Structure formats: C-alpha cells, structure tokens
Image (cartoon, coloured by chain):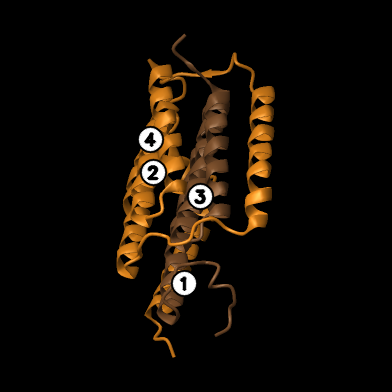
Chain colours: A brown, B orange
Amino acid sequence: MGSVPISWFLTLSAVLFVIGVAGFLFRRNIITVFMSIELMLNAVNLSFVTFAYQFKKVDGHLLALFVMVVAAAEAAVGLAIILTVFKRRPSLDIDEVNSMKN
Amino acid sequence: MDLVLFLVFAIFAVACAINVVVQTHPIASAISLIGVMSSLAVLYLLLGGEFIAAAQVIVYAGAIMVLFVFVIMLLNSGAETRSGRSLMAQALGAPLLIALLGILAFFVQRLFPHEDTARFGGFMGGSPKDVGNALFTTYLLPFEATSVLILIAIVGAIVLAGREPD
C-alpha cells in the first residue's frame, strides 16, 4: 500500500495522448492544434520516464530530454510558419489554410 | 502517500488536458497546458527523474509556453467562431479514439501486472550527474545532432518570421 502500479502511469500517458489526438482532430484553431501536439509529446515523455523507472536505467530520461529538444525546435519553426501564414491571410482557421500556393 | 500524490496530480493533469481541448480561447488552452506540464513534472519527480522534472518546468512550462503565449498575443487571436471539424472527422474520430485508448489500456494492463509498483526513492538514477554522464558518453552523437538541429531551427525560424510578404 502506498506505492503506485507502473501500469497506472502508462495508462495516464495513454489517456493524455488520446486527449491530444482528439484536440488535433476536432479543433480548428491552428495554435490549439499545435498545443495538442505538445500534449501528445508530453504524454510520450511520461512513458519514457516510467520505463526508465521500470528498467532502472537512465536511458529513458535521455530520450525524454531529446524529445524536449525536438519539441522546442518544432515549436519555434511551427510558430514562425504560423506568423508567416497570418501575415498573408489574417485567419487562424486551418480549414482556410488548405493550399500551399498563393 | 505516493498513491495520493499520484492520484491528485494525475487527475489534475487529465482535467487540464481536457480543458486544453474544450476551451475556445487559445490563451485559456495555453494556461491549461502549463497545468498539465507542471503536474507531469511532479510525476517525473515521483519516478526519480530529478533532472527531467526540472527541465520539464524550465523548458516546457517556461520557454515553449512563453513562446506560445507570445505568438497568441502577437496575432491577437480571438475565440474560435466555428467549432467542430467535418462530419467525417466527428463521426469516425470519436469511436476510433475510444478504440485506440481501449487497445492501449488493454495492452498496458496485460504487459504490466499489478505487482510492478513505483514508489518515491525506488530509482534515483535520474540526477543531473547521471544524466550528464550518459549524455556525454553513450549519447554523445545524438547530443551533437540535436545541437545542429537546434541551430537549423533557429535559423529557419528567423528566416521564416522575418520575411516580408510579397
């Protein structure tokens, strides 16, 4: 009593991931879609850290760290793309930004 | 004690995550996402990831979310006017998502029996010393590769955001 089953952490990770996918599928605002992607990356990070605990190895923490770095790079470039698109047509609705030309 | 800590922050994380998806205003979503990331940092600490918990708060809840909030305010983005995507996404999306969650939960329950439990102090190999040791020996090449990736991302972001529309 008092300790937490490993499977609960992984189930929490799965729940957060599915909520992120739901946000990605059902939202129109491009920034909210982006935040849903960050939510999915966070859920995967929780799995990595849980596995690091399970196998008593530090490797999972390193992988979570690399995911954070890639998420930071992705957020910087993605938000720059959103800024560029917004300069061209002032709408954040992803259904209106459906073509790459003009 | 650990169980109470886990339950409190797991429920807080799930509530904030649902709030991220259902809020119509992006600022409210961003604040909720900070809540998710902070509660995940507590869970990382519970699993013995001292360094990764600190990095989660500093990099995610700090740097990345400040970037998000900055862009939301720069674009002066209001609340979403129309909600919901195409009929196809709504009709197929929800059942498929529930199926995905069911399959994931089923395999997790099957693969990890309930005797495997985590408690605070069960694994303390996530200190900055251990992470740094692994980062500069086993993971030296990925570390250098990510530094190049970050450099490319910085240059790309500056070029994209600084370009004048023609």
Nearer-the-camera pick, B33 or B83: B83
Crowding around mark 2 (Cα neighbors within 10 Å: few <14, some 14 to 19, many 20+) is many
User: Does residue B155 appear to the left or right of B98 in the view shown?
Assistant: left
Q: Which mark is residue A67?
A: 3
Three-letter amino acid code at the position of disc 4: Ser
Circles 3, 1 touching at the beta carbon (< 8 Å): no
SS of the residue under disc 2: helix
Q: Which residue appears at 52% of the width and 32% of the height?
A: A12
- On the question of residue B116 being in view, the answer is yes
Q: Position of residue A35 (x, y in %)?
A: 45, 53
Location of residue B11 with respect to B156 vertically, above or below: above
Secondary structure state at the residue bearing disc 1: helix
Q: Which residue is mark 2?
A: B56
Residues tagged 4 and 3 counted as in contact (Cβ below 8 A): no
* Disc nearest the viewer among 3 and 1: 1
The answer to whether the residue labelled 2 contacts the one labelled 3, judged by CB atoms less than 8 Å apart, is no
Q: Residues within 10 Å of mark 4 (few under 14, many from 20)?
A: many
- Which disc, if any, is residue B39? 4
Q: Residue furthest top?
A: A1
Q: Which residue is mark 1?
A: A81
The residues tagged by marks 4 and 3 sit, at their Cα atoms, a distance apart of 18 Å
Subunit of label 4: B
Report the Cα–Cα distance between label 2 and label 1.
25 Å
Q: Chain of mark 3?
A: A
User: Which chain letter matches label 2?
Assistant: B
What amino acid type is highlighted by mark number 2? Gln
Instruction: Label 3, secondary structure: give it.
Output: helix
Q: Which residue shows up at 34% across the image and 40% down it?
A: B54
